[in-house]
Image: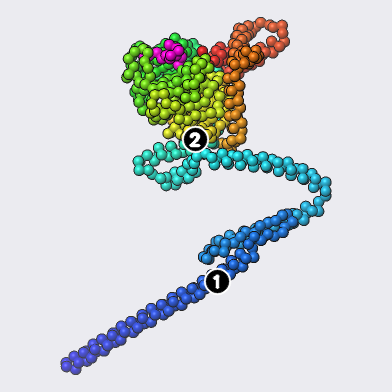
Amino acid sequence: MEDQSSIETVNEEEQQTTEELNTEDNIQRKRSRICSHLEEETDQKINNELSNEIVREETSTLAETNHDSSDDKVTENPTGPVKRRKLNADIKEVPDEEEKTNDSIKTTTTTKDESKSGSSTAISTTTDDEDDDDDDGVEEDDEDDEIKNEDNQEENKNEEENLPPTINRYLHLRQRELGTFHRSRQRTTCRVFHDNIIASRNIIQRMKVSHTLDAHNGCVNALAFNRIGTLLASASDDLQIIVWDWALQQAAAAFDSKHQSNVFQAKFIPFSYDYKIVSCARDGQVRLAELHPSGTLSSSKKIAQHLASAHKLSVDTITGNDIFSCGEDGIIFHIDLRETKANKLLTVGSEEINKLPLYSIELNRHNQNEFVVAGMDPYIRIFDRRYIESQTTKPLKSFCPDLLKKNEDRRSQPSVTCAVYNYNGTEILGSYNDEDIYLFDATHSDGADAIHRYHGHRNNNTVKSVNFYGRNSEYIISGSDCGHVFIWDKPTEKCIWYAKGDDDGTVNVLEPHPFFPIIATSGLEHDVKIWAPLNQQSVDYKRLSMIMKRNTRNRERELQFPSMFDTDPSSFLRLMRPVFRRMARHSNADGERTDENDEDDEDDNDDDDDDDDDINDDDDDESGPRRGRHVYSFDCAPS
């Protein structure tokens, strides 16, 4: 037993010694491996540093030699001197492999181009002299066209550089697609996006007629979007009011307004599911039409009666029950739809006229008790219905440009055809007849001068409207007698865009969409034009300046007519030319009416027969129960 125990102890001692030896061997092996790895890493670092130093020395020497040899070096070429690209001698870092490949590709392409140019010059020298002469003539014409195009491009670039900076619409649209659009502190990302995109000058300068809405049989005098911008109401000289689904290019409803003369204004009543539309016309009536869900007219009633033409009305967008109207009789009506009778609020007068003809009225969007009116004098008046006590009340404030106050002759004083508030009621925009457009600060004191002036358009033939464009009223938009639509940048007073909006010569109404970069316009033509940013061409500023100069020149020439009566009797005929045209339209209308009544009669004159055939062809082309365009002649000028 003792021998076995001794043997076991010996075996245990041997095992312990072997385990200790194994552990020591393992530790030594690990140390040797670690040392070997460290030596390898240090060797690699040293080799890399040496290689980098060699590459740096080689690149620096190459750069110095190239800089010395190629600085201001010009090689002679049969086509002309070609300057070689200078190398930067200050480069210290080694270029990446991609840059090297790009440089190599560029050098190969340049050598190929040089070889091609050399071969082409060699071939061109072998041609005949006659062909050279012909080619020289063609090349001269091409060079002249290129020079003109380059001059126009340079002028457009200079004009673009003079304009204020705008928002990069491509960046915002891309960020919108990727979901990385910058969120403001206020959680109004969609509102900020809409404001930035609609106010972008790149969007405005791409405006183009997307489509037209053609169903009226007379000049379109009024346009109005509904509260959410899905429907568009239009009123015309044919006494029809049409509700358009403008995106689908079709009429959702059409009805007779029950007016007796030209319809000047039509607007939706808020909070009525777009079934109620209020309108005013030359007959002085203010009527309320209610539609059936099927699109037919359910009822129409007269809610106010002016003693003369009623041009504009304004609807309270907060309650939807209050309507304000103005007319050429100088009376302002307050109509509450919950009551049975209209309230005669006041009669506006001036120092020279007891009853001033009024052409425009609009409520302040942020203070529905305040409204602005304008009429046949250069003053824009602000009233507050809470402080109106008598039938003739002085306004809270009145604004007029200091330039127009100097004119004491009432007959030559310009009138205000339209006055509107901006988006928050702090600014008022006024368009003057035979004058420019002026912007006033509504927070200034009584009698303050205009803060901005916008020129280049014509406002003479008709009662034109003017409007702000942009969610924050960043731009000014107006029509013109020349048939163009103009948009000015509000702070800089520079015209940034124009386009032909009416072939007959006048654009009267401009209505921006409440949410999208869409504009609806109308004029002497019988259709409504919808504008969208679809154009790919840039603005031709050279032609724009020519059009604006021509408009100012024509206005100055016409303003000189009254002073020429004593010296030039023919000037009276030039001044009365629009009246003669109006009389001719009346006579043509009477002639067409008699021709339609006497279709069965035979005429002896062949020319008259041809005219009757033309009239009958036109009548056959017209469809629908619309009134003929010969019934009421167009006359939007102040009566």
The correct choice, above or below, for 72 with respect to 263 in the image is below
Dot 2 amino acid type:
Thr
Please give the residue where the numbered disc 1 appears in the rendered image: 57
Q: State which quadrant residue 370 falls in.
A: top left
Q: Nearer the viewer, mark 1 or mark 2?
A: 2
Image mark count: 2
> Can you see residue 327?
no
Q: Residue at x 57, y 62 (%)?
A: 88
> Can you see residue 543?
yes
Q: State which quadrant residue 620 falls in.
A: top right
- Which mark, by number, is residue 492? 2
Dot 1 amino acid type:
Glu
The correct choice, above or below, for 453 with respect to 144 in the image is above
Q: Earlier in the sequence, mark 1 or mark 2?
A: 1
- Which mark, by number, is residue 274? none
Residue 132: x percent and y percent? 80, 47
Q: State which quadrant residue 349 falls in.
A: top left
Q: Residue at x 43, y 37 (%)?
A: 195
Q: Secondary structure at mark 2?
A: loop
Residue 285: x percent and y percent? 44, 12
* Magenta residue check for 357: yes
Q: Residue at x 60, y 39 (%)?
A: 155
Q: CA distance from mark 1 to mark 2?
A: 57 Å
Image quadrant holding the N terminus, namely bottom left
Q: Secondary structure at mark 1?
A: helix
* Magenta residue check for 19: no
**Is disc 1 surrounded by few (<14), some (14 to 19) or many (20+) residues within 10 Å?**
few
Residues in magenta, as a range? 345-361
